[in-house]
Image (cartoon, rainbow, N blue to C red):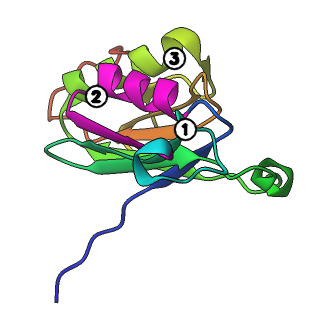
Amino acid sequence: MSFFVCPYLNFAGNAREAMTYYQSVFGGELTINTFGEFGMADLPAEGVMHSELQHEAFRVMGSDAMPGAEATWGGTRVYIAFMGDDVELLQGWYAKLAEEGKPGMPLEKQVWGDMYGDVMDKFGVEWMFNISLPEGWAQTGKA
């Protein structure tokens, strides 16, 4: 048996903007399908019914919320976490998300020996980064 977990993000009418932004941060191939393409006449034709960003290491999907769904949001925080050892790549992604977002914990070496930081991007999605550092990595190194 084979399976994987994929974050599916729901946006309040700006899924195209958000997913295009994520492609500019992470790279990968983005596909976007609209409500209009599927003949859903009761929804905005240009609204995103489904989108998918495929990166060689992960996949993120997203769509625009159905009208009224925004009222059900609140109280639950979910982070998308990157765990890895590619220091330069992951530092770069953190920095790009932080440019227009709100860094929470700065990306820096932690007591457990890894580099860690978190950031809320400009769309309100929260991202965690835990980077395993190579032997001999400078104690003063920061993103």
Query: Which residue is rendered at x = 40% and y = 45% of the image?
Result: 37
Q: Judge depth for marks 2 and 3 and give the one in front.
A: 2
Tell me the SS state at disc 3. Answer: helix
One can see residue 33 in this view? yes
Could you say which quadrant of the image residue 31 lies in?
top left
Q: Does 135 sit left or right of 22 as displayed?
A: left
Q: Would you place residue 29 above or below residue 67 in this image?
A: above
How crowded is the residue under tag 1: few (<14 C-alpha within 10 Å), some, or many (20+)? some
Query: Which residue is rendered at x = 82% and y = 58% of the image?
Result: 72
Residue 6, given in percent of the width and then of the height, sits at 37, 60
Q: Magenta part of the protein: which range?
A: 15-35
Q: Would you place residue 39 above or below residue 85 in this image?
A: below
Query: Which residue is rendered at x = 86% and y = 51% of the image?
Result: 71
User: Split into 4 quadrants, where in the image is the C terminus?
Assistant: top left
Tell me the SS state at disc 1. Answer: loop
- Please name the residue that numbered disc 1 is placed on: 45
How crowded is the residue under tag 2: few (<14 C-alpha within 10 Å), some, or many (20+)? some
Tell me the SS state at disc 2. Answer: helix
Residue 104, given in percent of the width and then of the height, sits at 63, 27
> Residue placed farthest to the top in the image?
99
Q: Which mark is residue 98?
A: 3
For the residue pair 72 and 3, the one nearer the viewer reads as 72
- Please name the residue that numbered disc 2 is placed on: 26
Gap between marks 1 and 2 measured at Cα? 27 Å
One can see residue 111 in this view? no
Q: Does 35 sit left or right of 135 as displayed?
A: right
Question: Residue type at mark 3?
Answer: Ala
For the residue pair 116 and 140, the one nearer the viewer reads as 116
User: Split into 4 quadrants, where in the image is the N terminus?
Assistant: bottom left
Question: Residue type at mark 1?
Answer: Ala
How crowded is the residue under tag 3: few (<14 C-alpha within 10 Å), some, or many (20+)? some
Gap between marks 2 and 3 measured at Cα? 13 Å
